[in-house]
Each structure stands twice: as C-alpha cells, then as structure tokens.
Image (tube, grey):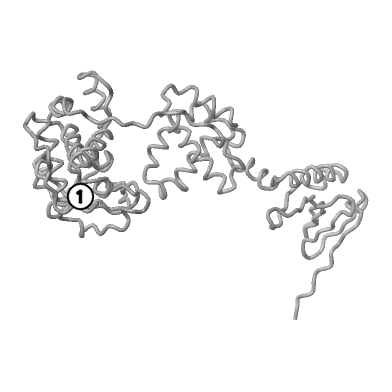
Amino acid sequence: MPRPKRATRKRQLTELYVQKAKPGEKRYLVWDAKQHGLALAVEPTGVKAWKAIYSFHGRPRWLHIGKASAIGLSDARVLCAEAMLAVAKGKDPQAEKKAERGAGTFAELAVRYVEEYAKSNNKSWQQGDTLVRRYALPRWGKLQAATITRSDVKALMRQIAAPVLANQVLAAVSAVFTWAMKEEIVQANPCKLVDRNPVKSRERVLSESELPKFWTAFGDSVQGRALKALLLLGQRPGEIAHMRHEHIVDGWWELPGAPIIGIWPGTKNAQSHRVWLPKPVREIIDSDESKGFVFGQGHRPVPGLAAVMREICQQLGGEPVRPHDLRRTHGTTITKLKFGREAMNRIQNHREGGIADVYDVHEYADENKHIMESVAAHILALAEGKPVESNVVQMGARR
C-alpha cells in the first residue's frame, strides 16, 4: 500500500505569521507562495530559519539563509531570489557556501590534501608537496583557498624562471584543487585554463665521445655507482635509487609494481617489472648483503643523483645532462643495435598503446637477458675506449 504523502504547507507568508508560527513535535516547513523555493523551517525547539530549497542535477539542495529572528521576510525573499538566479545560471549556492566555510586557508587545504589523499594514493606525493611548500605557500599560505583566482596562478607561474619547473608547480597546485573540488571543499580549480609553458621534448643522449668522460667522472662514490647502473640498466632514476638486495633473485632485479611504504616507491605504471642484471652491473653492486638499499646510505636510498649530475656537467662543460638522459641513452642503444622498439619498451617498462601489457615476462627472459648483456657490453666498451662490434647477433628477436 503506497505511503500517504505529507500535506504541503504553502501560503503567502507575512511577518505576523512568522512571529506566531508554533513549533510541533517534529520540524515542519511552510512554503512561501510568493517566492519560489523559499520555506520557513520551524524546529520543535521553536527556532525558525529560512531555507532556499532547489534541485541541482536532480538532487534536492537546502541552502540555509539564516534565522528568522535575524532576517526579515522581505530580505529572505530577496536572498532566496538571488539563490534561484544562481541555480538558473548553473551554479550550486549550497555547495559554494559550504566551500567558503570549510576550505580554510590554502596552507590548511594543502595539508588536508596530503594527509587525507596524497599519502595513500600518490606514490610521488612528496615531490608535489615539496613544490607546493616551496613556491605556493609563501604567496598563498594565509589566503582563503576559495578566494585564489586564475590570475593568482598566472602570477605565481611568472615568478618561476624555469619553464619546466613552473609547469611542475602548476600541476602540483592543480592536484590540490582537483581533490578539493571532488570533496566539495572548493567549487573551482583556478589552475584550469592556465596554459602550461611551451617546452621542448628532451632528446638528450650521451654521444660516443661523451661516454668515456662521464664514466670516468662518475667515479666510485655511491652516487657514481648508482649513475653507472642507471646507464647500464636503463631503468628510471628513482627506481635505481631504491634498488634493494632482496629484490635481486638469480641475477634478475624484480621491481614490484605497488609501493612498499618506506622502502620502495613502486613502478611508474604500477606494473611489476623484471630486469636482467648484466655482468658489469653485478660487479658494481657485488655485495654479501641480503637486504637493504643497494646504493643506500644507512636506511635511506641514495640521494642527490641530479645534484651530482649537475656538478659533473659543470666540470665537463657542454650541454647539461640529467639522470633521465642516461636512461634515454640506454634505450637509444637498444634500437641502435637493432633489437627494435618493442624490445626497448619491454625492457624499460613502457606502456605504449597497451602492447607491452600482453608480454609474459618469463616468455621473453632469454631474449631480454641477451639484450641487456649486449647493450651493457656495448656501452661499457665505448666508456672504456675499447673497440665495439658493429653488428650484434640477436637470438630470434621478435619484431
């Protein structure tokens, strides 16, 4: 049997009626016949308040206008009319009011983003948090988050001289506001429609004449050995820095896709990966340790690879080289030796068009092992000034 509908109270409200309205056992509403969406809510305690009630995306929304003891009927009608006009323009006044009340300062919002979302969902959250703290907080920390505008974002980017760095700061700040929008803490992301700085795609690789210079400059420090391993393995710098002894099994480095708190950041694409360690790398990392960071300092992964690369570049002169360029050099060598782009993507754990997702890591084990040994031998020969073979015999490489 259908539930009987409650009788709707509707009348043209007057100040006298509002004053004399009596409380009931439960809260009830009296709708104003003159102003669409305006209702007087009467609580069992006798408290009376104005509500603007409307529908937004098919869901009912209640906007608290204020207590009837503080706001008269005529003013309540005006405020309700303004709210209804905003709804007609596609806005959600109730959510906007909630956002203004709950966002707090940008500094508070940034902390909430890290604690409530980033730490558990973004393995590289520390990088974004560092950028926000260094560049955004000094300018915006005390501002109400909801008041920050697109102009503020553009001004922030103009203050950062390096175009790539400015783009990274923009992405870090945008992540904070995107999360806040999803949580209905703010209504808008001021980073939207802000153009990124145009930057050239880096194609920097070490030339044959540069390899001996850099190899010598790397030396035998912990950072230098890590950079050598990066050049010979072609994996991402952060993965090399976090390489652990317990992930090396029978000559294979097994990279877990998921992060392990405190010891492993996870792979960039969250896919587990398996890399053969060629002989020159095994000699670099030769150790009796069974656990811990291969290139660590105490219980910490090796720091400062980028800083060491900058120092080396200053010593050697020429065009700057970054740690990631060593990975690019390794990938270029794979294709140079005619193993093919698919092999490069597979070994460097790329995911282009879903192709690499179908590979069975054990199916290609022998081929990957051969490629890794060949590429490492080729790079090492160039680095040490020894003759290299121009053609590499492949083991039935699949194209």
Q: Residue at x 23, y 22 (%)?
A: 313
Mark 1 crowdedness (10 Å alpha carbons): few <14, some 14-19, many ≥20: many
Residue 319 rendering spot, x and y as whole percentages? 27, 22
* Occupied quadrant, residue 396: bottom left
Q: In the displayed structure, does residue 154 sit left or right of residue 74? A: left
Measured as percent of width and height from the top left, residue 353 is found at 37, 51
Above or below residue 71? Residue 153 is above
In this rendering, the answer to whether 285 lies above or below 221 is below
User: Mark 1 highlights which residue?
Assistant: 275
- Amino acid type at circle 1 is Val
Q: Position of residue 45 (x, y in %)?
A: 77, 57
Tell me, yes or no, if residue 66 can be seen here. no
Residue sitting at the far left: 386
In this picture, residue 178 sits left or right of residue 288: right
Q: Is residue 217 left or right of residue 40?
A: left
Secondary structure found at label 1 = strand
| Quadrant occupied by the N terminus | bottom right
| Nearer to me, 347 or 92 | 347
Q: Residue at x 58, y 41 (%)?
A: 103
Is residue 392 at least partly visible in the picture? yes
Q: Position of residue 366 (x, y in %)?
A: 15, 55
Q: Quadrant of residue 320?
A: top left
Q: Who is closer to the viewer here, 324 or 208?
A: 208
Taking depth in this image into account, of 366 and 72 the one nearest to the observer is 366
